[in-house]
Amino acid sequence: MSVEQFNPAQTALVEVTPAAIKHFSQQLAADKTATAVRLSVKESGCTGFMYVLDLVAKGTADDREIVLQDDVTLYVAEASENVIRGTKIDYVTEGVNRQLSFLNPNAKDHCGCGESFNVG
């Protein structure tokens, strides 16, 4: 496992908004076994990839560790880094719905339902 280091010449691995951090903090507080959030992607859907967020007790040996605040750590799967580098994670309210939003500069196409994306 490695810790993400700040390098101004390199695009940030991910950006997480305060609203998303608050959401993660609430999710972790409700789960008695998890201490962190793990982000990865998997092949899925009609356009290629989908985001996978898991509440975990710890990351894997290949994960990047990003401490967002005292009670929220984000692990990013190394195998997913090229697909998600530069992604902004937000927690948005649209009408009565609330959901996580992934603004990924690498995504070239999205499926109609928003479930999957392609980095073409």
Image: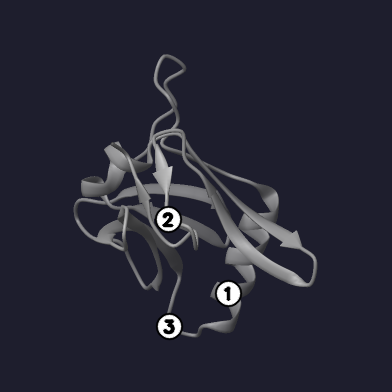
The answer to which quarter of the image holds residue 9 is top left
**Amino acid under label 3?**
Thr
Q: CA distance from mark 1 to mark 2?
A: 27 Å
Which residue is found at the position 26% from the left and 59% from the top? 42
Q: CA distance from mark 2 to mark 3?
A: 34 Å
Residue underneath mark 1: 27
Q: Nearer the observer, disc 1 or disc 3?
A: 1
Q: Secondary structure at mark 1?
A: helix
Residue underneath mark 3: 33
Above or below, 16 relative to 30: above
Q: How many residues crowd around disc 3 within 10 Å: few (fewer than 14), some, or many (20 or more)?
A: few
**Amino acid under label 1?**
Gln
**Amino acid under label 2?**
Cys
Residue furthest to the right: 95
Residue furthest to the top: 9
Quadrant, the C terminus: top left
Which residue is found at the position 32% from the left and 39% from the top? 119
* Dot 1 or dot 2, earlier in sequence: 1
Which residue is found at the position 49% from the left and 63% from the top? 113
Q: Which mark is residue 111?
A: 2
